[in-house]
Image (cartoon, rainbow, N blue to C red):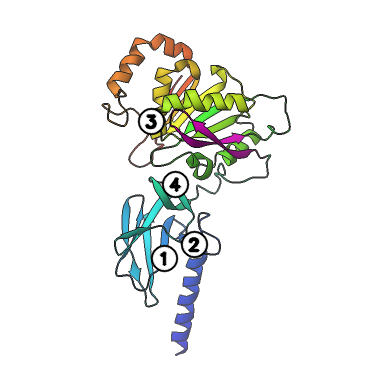
Amino acid sequence: MKRLSILGLGLMLSASSLMAQNVRPVTNIRNVQYPQLTSDNRGIFQLKAPDAKEVIVDICGKKYPMTKDDKGVWSATTDVLMSGINYYFMYVDGVQISDPASETFYGCSRMSSCIEVPYAKDDVRFELANVPHGETTMRRYYSNNEGAWRRMFIYLPPSYQTDLSKTYPVLYIQHGGGEDERGWALQGRTDIILDNLIAQGKANEMIVVMSDGNCKDFIKELTEECIPLVEKTYRVKKDAANRAMAGLSMGGIQTLNIAVEKPELFQYVGVFSSGWFASANRNFPGMGADEQYKKLAERKDYYNKQFKQFYLTMGGEEDIRHLHLVLA
C-alpha cells in the first residue's frame, strides 16, 4: 500500500512538473489557463462542451480531433507550432466558432482566435521594454474612391509629441490577405518593434502608416486618399527619399504594383512573402507576372536609378523567411 501511495504521489508530482513547464500564451483572455504551450511549442487546447458529439480544433488549416473527458471537457494537443501568430478555430458538431478563451483578431477574413508562440528567449524584438515609447493612433477618413468611411492606423515615434519642430520619414506598410488595417497595428506589434529598434539605434524615428488594402483600386486609394491625408495632417517629409512602401503577402503584391506604376513616390520598397501571380486574375486585373516583368525590362535603367533599396523575401515550405533576396 505504501509503495502504491508513493507511486501515486510520484505520478502526481510528475504531472505537476509537466504542468509547470507549460505556459499561457499572451493571447489568452484574462484568468483562463487554456490554451497552453508546451516547452517545445505544441499547443494544448480545451473546450467545455458536455453535450457536443464532436469537437475539432483547426489551427492554420490543420485539423485536430479533440477527446472528451468525464466532465465534458474536450482536449487536443497539436504538432509543434511556428513562432509568431497562429490563427485557429473550433468546430462543435460542424459549427465553426471562436475559442471563448482566446483574444480574437481579424484574420482569415473573419474574427479569429489566435495563439501566439514566442520566439527564442533571447529574441526580444517583439517584447515590451523599458525604452521611450511612441503611440499608435486611429485616423478615420472619407474615401471618395470607395464612397465610404475608412480608417488607418498611424504609428508616431517617441519624440513626435515633444519635438514639434521635427519632421519624419514615412513607411507605408500593408497587411496580408484576409486581414485589414488592424493587422500590423495589433498582431504585428509595429509600435513595440519600432520603439525597440529606435532605442537600440537600429532605426531612425519614422511615422508608419497602416491602411486598409481591401479596396477597389489600391493605387488610387493610397495616392489620392492616404498619402495626401498623411502629408496634410502629420509632420512628415514629403519627398520620395523619405518615403518607403512595404507589404506582406497580398500587401506585397500591392507594393510591387505601386512600385512599378508609381516609382517616383518611393525610394525604398520592401516585399515580404509575396510575388506576382503567374497571370492576371479578376482580383488583380492587368497584373500578371509577364506584364509586370515587361514593364521592368522596358524601364530598367529608370527603376535602377529611382530605387535606393528594393528588398524581397520569398517564402518556402518550412519557413516563409528561409530565403532572402536583396536587390539594391
Element at label 1: strand
Q: Name the residue under label 2.
A: 22
> CA–CA distance between discs 4 and 1?
22 Å
Estimate the x, y position of residue 312 in percent, counting from the top left. 42, 27
Compared across the picture, whether 60 is left or right of 115 comes to: left
- Residue 46, labelled with which disc? 1
Residue carrying label 4: 106
> Which range of residues does the magenta coloring cover?
133-156
Q: For mark 3, what is the residue?
A: 216
| Among the two numbered marks 4 and 1 on one chain, the one whose residue lies closer to the N terminus | 1
What amino acid type is highlighted by mark number 2?
A: Asn
Q: What residue type is labelled 1?
A: Gln
Mark nearer the viewer, 2 or 3:
3
Q: Earlier in the sequence, mark 2 or mark 3?
A: 2
- Given the image, on which type of amino acid does mark 3 rest? Lys
Marks 2 and 4, Cα distance to the nearest angstrom? 27 Å
* Residue appearing at x 34%, y 73% in the figure: 51
Crowding around mark 3 (Cα neighbors within 10 Å: few <14, some 14 to 19, many 20+) is few
Q: Nearer the viewer, residue 169 or 24?
A: 169
